[in-house]
Image (cartoon, grey):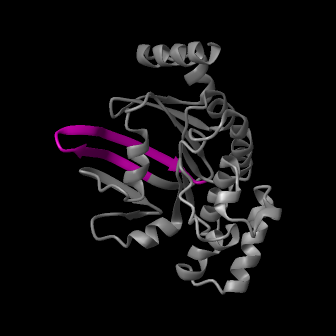
Amino acid sequence: MSEIIRIEGLRMAFGSQEVLRGIDLAVDEGESVAIIGPSGSGKSTLLRCLNRLEEPSAGRVIFEGHEFRKGTDVNALRARMGMVFQHFNLFPHMTVLGNIIEAPVHVRKVPKERAIEEARTLLARVGLADRADAFPSQLSGGQKQRVAIARCLAMQPRLLLLDEVTSALDPELVGEVLAVIRDLASQGMTMLIVTHEMSFARDVADRVIFMDGGIVIERGPPDAIFGNPRNDRLRKFLRAVVDRAAN
């Protein structure tokens, strides 16, 4: 597999607070990488730095062989590196179909009829073929998140960034969103997934990254991370997650 993104020495500070303290990571095409860790460890900031919602303080991001610097065409970057957020970010005044075709028509310059056809295919893929004409206010949280994923896929990204996409959902709606992501992984979509769903990370990810305090503490295949963690901090984190799930 060919490398799709490389992160070297990435740092991010907000004032005197250094949130990322030198992240090194490479992801191959077709690979699903789950990023886990406690709140405040820098997981979401890492994703936001990759697609330039935040400008890193230092380090390099090389995507598809090109290094992105200040002044890079951010829209072109985001067309190839899609991001799905915790809180959906759908346009409330647009229908589901309108939300999905907006960027392909105006950014990719896809003819509207073709964009509509592609959008309907994506809606069927995420199990919402019958909701094309609904508005976001008429959808459940799980449906909104599946629309957000379809909207992102409509740009045909090479890399998908998923930032805690189930954390704002009621527990009974989490499964329907995870099923979509699981399907994407099985079809070879390259993904960086920030998640607090440990069983999902274990089942779906090719590799798992554990972050704490703005650095990568441990990385490896899911069986090693969850079954035989080497680092005391990771072991403590996993015990806390298991205890919380049991109560």
User: So how many labels did they put on this image?
Assistant: 0
The residue positioned 41% from the left and 54% from the top of the image is 50
Is residue 192 positioned above or below 152 on the image? above
- Where does the image place residue 2, in percent across and percent down from the top left? 55, 55
Q: Quadrant of residue 9?
A: top left
Residue 65 image point, x, y percent: 43, 63
- The residue located at (40%, 52%) in the rendering is 48
Is residue 8 inside the magenta stretch?
yes
In the image, residue 63 sits, relative to residue 140, either above or below, namely below
Q: Is residue 115 above or below residue 202?
A: below
Pinpoint residue 205: horizontal percent, then vertical percent: 62, 38
Left or right of 223 on screen, residue 124: right
Going by the picture, which residue comes out furthest to the left?
A: 16
Which sits in the foreground, 82 or 132? Answer: 132
What residue sits 39% from the left and 45% below the top? 46
Q: Is 49 located above or below residue 216 in the figure?
A: below
| Horizontal arrangement in the rendering, residue 115 relative to residue 240 (left or right) | right
- Looking at the rendering, the stretch of residues picked out in magenta corresponds to 6-29
Viewer-side residue, 160 vs 22: 160
Across and down, in percent, residue 22 comes to: 29, 40
Quadrant of image for the C terminus: top right
Instruction: Residue at 71% x, 40% y: name it.
Output: 173
Secondary structure character of the magenta stretch overall: strand
- The answer to which of 192 and 31 lies nearer the viewer is 192
Query: Viewer-proximal residue, 96 or 178?
Result: 96
Q: Quadrant of residue 204?
A: top right
Indicate whether residue 177 is drawn in magenta.
Answer: no
